Amino acid sequence: QSQIYFCIFYSKLYKTKMASWTVESFGPELVTKEGVVPTATALAGKSRIALYFSAHWCPPCRGFTPVLAEFYDQLAEEDPSQLAIIFVSSDSDQSSFNQ
């Protein structure tokens, strides 16, 4: 059975140490739609960070991803600083990851 993993880290208590915590946890850089960005920059000001473990080959994940994207878009319209989602891919190649 496939499972969808979605974790949210609440960072309000750690706002002063957020930059160091995120870099220690996720590495110095993240790949974004805009390209490679320093982790501290990509996650600056976010009050919640979500990790979404998924893969293109996973049917339940393919079904959930559009729902998550719609939720994120709605939340971002209200307050773009509320949530950052880090996609953790289990895809085996770059082409699958890009889809």
Image: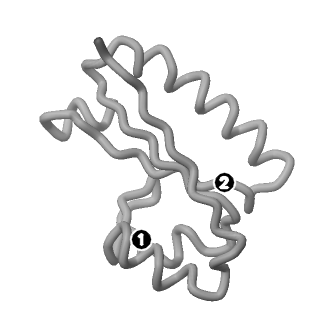
Q: Using residue 59 as the reference point, say whether residue 95 is left or right of it.
A: left
Q: Is residue 15 above or below residue 5?
A: below
| Residue identifier under label 1 | 37
- Tag 1, which secondary structure? strand
| Residue identifier under label 2 | 83
Question: Which color mode does the image show?
Answer: one colour
**Quarter of the rendering occupied by the C terminus:** top left
Residue at point 70%, 38% (across, down): 73
Q: Is residue 61 above or below residue 41?
A: above
Residue at point 46%, 48% (across, down): 51
Q: Which labelled disc corresponds to residue 27?
A: none
**Quarter of the rendering occupied by the N terminus:** top left
Residue at point 54%, 50% (across, down): 50
Residue at point 82%, 55% (across, down): 79
Q: Amino acid at mark 2?
A: Leu
Q: Nearer the viewer, mark 2 or mark 1?
A: 2
